[in-house]
């Protein structure tokens, strides 16, 4: 019986060794340098632990989207942040609801995440490239409400994209989500790093590995 047990243990170790060549980190996972994906090998290992490992900031309280005011009309021209991003990114002059010049209804947009073209503003979301929930976990949780407001409406962190693609992205980081179109990976990585550095948000080793993969697509 002991010999059988030893043989089984040896077989298990061999299969595990063949599954990946890298050692696991403190989170129970490892980074695949070829794909930029973080792989978990323990039950407690998760995207959140990979994204926040090696960070020095501690979130202040639980994340609530209500604490991050967005789509404001800072210059009181009746066009909020969403409208301004739609106007700026449309390839033709936009049309407004009820012709009041406030809420955008139609235009021509090419989603850089997917390459799909849209003419109805209602089919688009304004994505936070660095998600609000992730910003909360990596340093923004202790910010003032005014600072959270600034971050939520910063054009450097905003982009008009297909609403369904944005919903799939959610609060994921480049560790577990990348734009479907590889041709946008370079720009996505550049803007992710720009926003993180601009606001002093921490970047995990998992993020660094994924961003390195994505910048390999810069030409």
Image: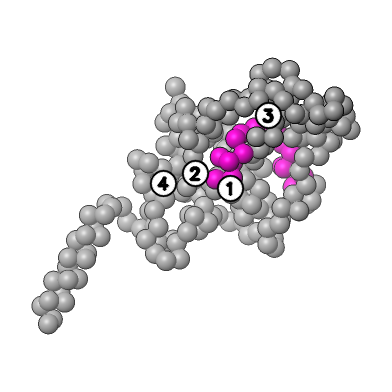
Binning the other alpha carbons within 10 Å of mark 2 as few (below 14), some (14 to 19) or many (20 upward) gives some
Q: Quadrant of residue 210?
A: top left
Q: Are marks 2 and 3 in contact (CB under 8 Å)?
A: no
Towards the viewer: 149 or 87: 87
Tell me whether circle 2 and circle 1 mark residues in contact (CB < 8 Å).
yes
Residue 154 is a magenta residue: yes
Element under disc 4: strand
- The residue furthest bottom is 1
Residue range of the region highlighted in magenta in the rendering = 148-168
Q: Residue at x 25, y 60 (%)?
A: 16
Sequence-earlier tag: 2 or 1:
1
Label 4 with label 2: CB-CB less than 8 Å = no
Q: CA distance from mark 2 to mark 1?
A: 9 Å
Disc 1 to disc 3, how far (Cα)? 22 Å
**Marks 1 and 3: which is nearer the front?**
3
The residue lying at 49 percent from left, 55 percent from top is: 47
Per the picture, the main secondary structure of the magenta-coloured stretch is: helix
Q: Mark 1 and mark 4 in contact (Cβ < 8 Å)? A: no
- Residue at the image point whose x is 61% and y is 34% from the top: 161
Q: Secondary structure at mark 1?
A: loop
Point out the frontmost of discs 4 and 2. Answer: 2
Specify the label residue 170 is tagged with: 1
Q: Residue 177: give its label.
A: 2
Alpha carbon separation for disc pair 4 and 1: 17 Å
The C terminus is located in which quarter?
top left
Mark 4 neighbour class, 10 Å CA radius: few under 14, some 14 to 19, many 20 or more: many
* Residue 182 spot, x, y in % from top left: 45, 31
């Amino acid at each position: 019986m002991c010999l059988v047990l030893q043989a089984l243990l040896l077989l298990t170790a061999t299969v595990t060794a063949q599954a990946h060549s890298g050692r696991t980190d403190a989170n129970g996972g490892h980074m695949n340098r070829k794909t930029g994906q973080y792989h978990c090998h323990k039950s407690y290992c998760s995207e959140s632990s990979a994204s926040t490992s090696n960070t020095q900031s501690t979130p202040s309280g639980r994340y609530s989207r209500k604490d991050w005011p967005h789509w404001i009309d800072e210059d009181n021209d009746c066009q909020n942040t969403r409208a301004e991003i739609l106007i700026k990114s449309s390839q033709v002059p936009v049309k407004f609801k009820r012709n009041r010049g406030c809420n955008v209804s139609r235009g021509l947009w090419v989603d850089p995440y997917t390459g799909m073209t849209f003419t109805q503003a209602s089919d688009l979301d304004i994505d936070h490239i660095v998600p609000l929930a992730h910003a909360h976990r990596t340093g923004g949780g202790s910010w003032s409400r005014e600072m959270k407001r600034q971050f939520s409406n910063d054009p450097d962190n905003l982009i008009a994209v297909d609403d369904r693609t944005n919903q799939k992205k959610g609060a994921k980081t480049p560790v577990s989500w990348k734009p479907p179109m590889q041709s946008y990976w370079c720009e996505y990585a550049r803007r992710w790093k720009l926003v993180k550095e601009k606001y002093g948000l921490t970047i995990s080793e998992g993020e660094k590995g994924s961003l390195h993969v994505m910048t390999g697509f810069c030409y």
